[in-house]
Amino acid sequence: MDLLTNHLLTLILFTPVVGAVVLLFLPAKNIRVLRWAALAASLVPFGLALGLWARFDPSAEGFQFVEMMPWYPAIQSSYHLGVDGISLMMVLLTVVLTPLAVLASFTVTERVKAYMFLFLLLETGMLGVFLSLDLLLFFVFWEVGLVPMYFLIAQWGGTRRNYAALKFILYTMGGSLGLLLATQMIGVVAGTFDLTELFQIWPALNSGTLLGLPMATVKAVAFWAFVIAFAIKVPVWPFHTWLPDAHTEAPTAGSMILAGVLLKLGAYGFLRLVLPLYPLESKLFAGWLAALGALAIIFGALGAFGQKDFKRLVAYSSINHMGFVVLGIAAAAAAVGSQDAVIALNGAVLQMVTHGLSAAGMFFLVGVIYERTHTRDLTEFGGLFAQMPVYGGVLLFTAMGSLGLPGLAGFVSEFLVVRGAWPVFTLATALSMIGLFFTGAYILKALKMVLHGPLNERWKGKLPEMSLREGIVIAPLMVLMLILGVWPAWALDVINRTVSMISLAMSLWF
């Protein structure tokens, strides 16, 4: 019990690694055992995270379940973990989507041991980013999350997988170089990598020099290094071009995790590092960030509407939906300390969760139809509702959740972002409604071309209905989308205290 009480976050973080190591000792030819062992290993952190959620106190200030021990004393870096309302929701999203993605991967038949090994390492990398309270530790886990996804795309992806994987790693590693530089600069100047200390001293650190440069220049360089690294990861337009290729070529489960969790690392970086460490700079450049968020909403929707590849359409929709997260963050930076800022931040964090659920569901459903038809060309479908009524109903429900239909999760989060951003960036918010209009257009276009119209004779009598395994994968996502749509308070209660504290802490520097 002491281990569970005092080291719960460590158990959540490293049980996937333990599971990955166990897989190495299992026979490679016994695919069934490997699949179920990987699923079991991914379910352990899910169970532990449920216990974390049950014991989390939303009314408490600061970080909870904190663990801290020396890691690299020579440079004042420590193994420091903790959770607040934002990181808890991201942890829950990760541990929900990973087992579902592993279950969706049961169709993988080549090099299953390596595939599942990489997937479990990827889970630890993602969880580490959300749990780290040390800047150097944050960077280490940030990098750990990149490598497995590169190999998942390069080894198990589509026909252009090498190109997509290389583009993915070049973009994200390019951003990571700036992140590493900024991390080193902060550590040298501040004398610590501990985030709880940096939140107190870094915004006020305006004296001294580094390499002959005044402190204002050092902070400006670090700020832009952070912003660019996280903007690439979100991705914010115009840093988005790696995303459609990576999504299109990644295996189905890889796309589920890439859209569901990995994109959220960039937005989480803005929330955890950029806003608290750079409140003055964030406010100064908030208008530019809002403009980029609005452009992402518009161009993401227009790009999705122009696609004939079903998976590529869903990929562009992620750019569209993550634009609302960026808009909410920008509004919170500009209206720091106000009620509008808190509302916008609540919406941004909730949008990260709701988009994770709907995007993972949509990518999975694209994979379901691709496994049966071996094509993603929307012009090749038509009339499949009559052939696969269960699949049609599930796709309709999930697409409406992605659309933001009232009563489903996407509506609540996008409404909060728009409500919070409207008084702050009225023009950008109004323009983003163009993207919202085309969101409905591309969703309805996809539904029409896949489910409605005359049945393509090519598929008559040849498409089996969704299997029980496929139903088990999509059902939890549908349930969560519905629960968050009709009763969002349980999630917002967890989020609100933390975002209120962030906004208040930022306002103290003005």
Image (cartoon, rainbow, N blue to C red):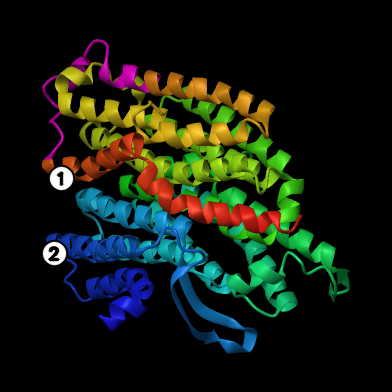
Viewed as shown, does residue 11 lie left or right of 27?
Answer: right
Foreground residue, 18 or 420? Answer: 420
The residue shown at (25%, 74%) is 24
Residue 16 falls in which quadrant of the image?
Answer: bottom left
On the image, which quarter does residue 480 sit in?
A: top left
Highlighted magenta segment, given as a residue range: 445-467
Callout 2: 10 Å neighbours few (<14), some, many (20+)? some
Q: Is residue 506 magenta?
A: no
Residue at the outermost front position: 59
**What's the residue type where badge 2 is placed?**
Val
Q: Which numbered disc, 2 or 1, marks the residue closer to the eye?
A: 1
Q: Please give the residue where the numbered disc 2 appears in the rendered image.
A: 33
- Percent coordinates x, y for residue 146 in the rendering: 48, 60
Query: Which residue in the structure is indicated by mark 1?
Result: 469
**Label 2: element kind:** helix
Q: Indicate the quadrant containing the C terminus: top left, top right, bottom left or bottom right.
A: bottom right
Q: Secondary structure at mark 1?
A: helix
Residue closer to the observer: 133 or 29? 133
Asked if 82 appears above or below 229 in the picture, the reply is below
The percent position of residue 52, horizontal first and vertical second, equals 33, 65
Category of crowding for the residue at label 1, using alpha-carbon neighbours closer than 10 angstroms: few (below 14), some (14–19), many (at least 20): few
The answer for how far apart the CA atoms under marks 2 and 1 are is 16 Å
> Closer to the N terminus: mark 2 or mark 1?
2
Give the image location of residue 487, x and y in percent.
Answer: 33, 39
Tell me if 158 is positioned left or right of 330 in this view. left
Asked whether 495 or 321 is in front, the reply is: 495
At 50% from the left and 21% from the top, the residue drawn is 438
List x then y, in percent, for residue 206: 82, 68
